[in-house]
Amino acid sequence: MRIAIVGLGPAGASLTHFLRGTRHDVSLYDYRSRLGKPCGNAFAPNIIVPRNLIRTTVKRLVVNFGKKQMVLNKGPLFNVVDKPGLMQRLVEGYDVMREMAAPEILLKHYDVVVDARGPSAVRNPSIPTPYQVKISDPKWPQDEAFMNFDMRRMGYLWIFPQGGDNVAIGAGYLRDERKYAVDIVKRYVDQRNGKILSVEGAPIATKLKLDVGAGNLVRIGEAAGFIHHITMEGNRPAVESAFELSRTINDLDAYRERAQRLFRMVLGSAWLSKHPLLAGMFVTSTRVWLTMRSLSLLRTIRVG
Ligand SMILES: Cc1cc2nc3c(=O)[nH]c(=O)nc-3n(C[C@H](O)[C@H](O)[C@H](O)COP(=O)(O)OP(=O)(O)OC[C@H]3O[C@@H](n4cnc5c(N)ncnc54)[C@H](O)[C@@H]3O)c2cc1C
């Protein structure tokens, strides 16, 4: 079968990896010269990546909800990964067409077109744009991360180690209060007093329902709506949806059915963001704790 994959973030790049060695003829499109968009680079540990691409492992997570605080410190919680390096490795050996591609138009030339364009694939979305600053901060423990939830704005500030002496400080809110995100990140950056390495931002497509495409056009990753609505974690669901598609590529209806199940199972909190008042009651330490713990119960998927 002739398959085009448009977009080589974690979804498209891991699908390429899973289809390697099959008899399918796979063509790749991504307009970026360097793969891997701005990201905190945290991957749940059920996604097994090559060891040399792990920059650090988070073993302690401190979460603040207003005045309450919770500490998770059992087992590895996240691996912080060299994401551009991983994406590059997953597509190694393939020619990538460096162009802005339109999946609907490619359908004329391929049997199956996979839309893995991330947020660019989403029409009329509610798209917050998290803001993130990377700094060098030798004092921040490299095995520790921090989240400060804001239930009213439906989002949080995060500090994630990035390996070496580096740390990413970012914030994003479902009710997109961009200025607030920028201000709060700046405040934390000032407090840490480290050297600024980069300032970045990219949209997150928090659409509330799954859209897996129709006919021979099929969507995976954030393009389909696979993003966790409490933690805004998108890397793991991107890889998981790619894995499901790789196993059902000859039967797209089977993929669509499995994708519904995956969406309900992992991202069942989507309705919360439609009901901010109820959400305020539900986004409690218990719920986030369950979310984090459930990560360790998921099946493992090896990429790279
Ligand atoms: C600041 C920030 C921090 C984040 N931190 C984390 C984190 O720590 N952990 C986590 O799990 N998630 C995090 N996320 C979310 C996560 O990055 C995304 O959910 C995840 O990358 C989605 O993967 P994807 O492959 O579906 O899409 P993307 O990673 O968005 O990849 C899409 C690719 O498609 C390409 N593309 C788009 N349109 C076209 C086109 N027309 N033609 C060709 N190519 C195209 C783009 O260049 C891109 O490479 C963060 C997001 C942001 C913005």
Image (tube, rainbow, N blue to C red):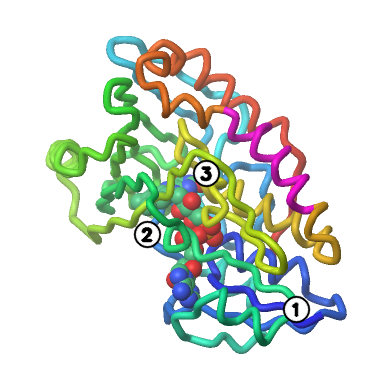
User: Is 33 a magenta residue?
Assistant: no
Image position, residue 18 (x, y; %) = 76, 66
Q: Amino acid at mark 3?
A: Ile
Whether residue 4 sits left or right of residue 161 in the image: it is right
Tell me: residue 97, above or below residue 8.
below
Q: Which residue is mark 2?
A: 38
The label on residue 111 is 1
Q: Which residue is mark 3?
A: 227
Tell me: residue 232, above or below residue 133.
above
Image position, residue 82 (x, y; %) = 50, 61
Instruction: Measure how far apart labels 1 and 2 are at the Cα level.
Output: 32 Å
Few, some or many C-alpha atoms within 10 Å of disc 2 (few <14, some 14-19, many ≥20)? some
Few, some or many C-alpha atoms within 10 Å of disc 3 (few <14, some 14-19, many ≥20)? many
Q: Amino acid at mark 2?
A: Pro
Ranked by sequence position, the earlier of labels 1 and 3 is: 1
User: Is 259 a magenta residue?
Assistant: yes
Ranked by sequence position, the earlier of labels 2 and 3 is: 2
Q: Residue at x 27, y 47 (%)?
A: 137
- Which contiguous range is marked in magenta? 255-268
Q: Residue at x 45, y 40 (%)?
A: 232
Is ligand 1 less than 8 Å from the beta carbon at label 2? Answer: yes
